[in-house]
Image: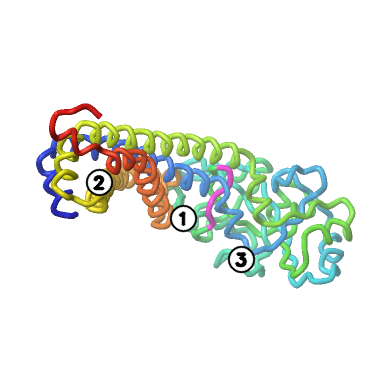
Amino acid sequence: MWFLAWREIRHGRVRFGLTALLVGLVAFLVFMLTGLAVGLGDAGVSGLRRLPADVVVYAAGSEKTLSRSSLPAADGARIAAVPGVSSVQPIGQTMAQAKGPGASLPVALMGVEPSAPFAAPGLGRGGIVLDRTLEGKARPGDVLTVQPGGVRLTVAGFADLGSLQHTAVAQVPLDEWRRVQPSAVGAYLVTTSGDARGISAAVPGTDAVTKSEAVEAVPGYSAETGTLNLIRGFLLAVTALLTGTVFWIFTMQKEPSLAVLRATGARARLLVGSYLVQVALTTVLGVAVGLAFVAGIGAAMPAGTFSLPGGSAALSAVLLGALALGSSAASLRRLLTVDPLLSLGRNA
């Protein structure tokens, strides 16, 4: 099986090489779109994903958006009294511009209690902690003027805070956030053994949702990732069509030699096994080439744009391989039904 497959690949190395290159080009696009979907998706919601909570409680009518939500401080005690709730943490968020000595930085300003378990190390009154992606644009000790509000805050350090709506997160004490955005509390992060509906029913004027629902509701996130995943799906379909068509043509071209093998007693199992080995080797080579190109290009792309975790890359590679093998199965019928009399020059 392996000998026959490898011998045919060596004999037709140009056509098999071109087929592998075509698969590699499509694989490159699939991996690139996968990396963009993951990278851009993380840039839109990673700041929210990193917050420890089972449920996020917004103001009713805020469309599950932190920057549009405003709740009274008294709601925190009401939420804490709901059965099953074990932790309630207030939070506020607004988009702001932080002007410093060297640059003007757009930030997703997040107000948290300095005692909260997710507060950045070093966060204190009059301070601001920036996401690490801003390290080259500001330094600890720099004084930043935050607009709106004209609030002056000192950079206390950097931490892995993520980003929201493609804007780096900056944490400030909740009292300082209120000077920028006059509001008691934007929303509440809740740890609970119950469900979100119980909180909404117990505390009127609130809209409690699970953390995954809150992530999906971030403006632009679903549309952005959905579009990229739709294009990725079309490319996977193209891979299946491309591989299936090419190997169908290959099978038709070698019918006379297949007929000779059948006439000399070759088993169908040998022919099918050899065929599947050829498809697998060609696909693996193409996928490897595509992944290598993506790794090189992805490393040169700006931070927060491209991210291809090992799990996402492996899933895409498995999908490409499975689709290639599945679509090529259409040619198996010709392998199994080829007429040995073709070897004598007769028509099927």
In the displayed structure, 260 sits above or below 109; it is above
Q: Position of residue 70 (x, y in %)?
A: 79, 49
Q: Is residue 68 visible?
A: yes
Residue extending farthest top: 347
Mark with earlier residue (2, 3): 3
Name the image quarter holding the C terminus: top left
Nearest to viewer (mark 2 / mark 3): 2
Disc marking residue 132: 1
Residue at image mark 2: 275
Three-letter code for the amino acid on which mark 2 is drawn: Tyr
Q: Is residue 296 visible?
A: no
Q: Which of the 4 image quarters holds residue 261?
A: top left
Q: Are marks 2 and 1 in contact (CB under 8 Å)?
A: no
Residue in front for this viewpoint, 78 or 85: 85
Three-letter code for the amino acid on which mark 1 is drawn: Arg
Residue at image mark 3: 118
Report crowding for label 2: few under 14, some 14 to 19, many 20 or more residues within 10 A (C-alpha): many
User: Which residue: 18% across, 35% down?
Assistant: 341
Label 3, label 1: how far apart the Cα atoms are: 16 Å
Residue 239 shown left or right of residue 113 in the figure: left
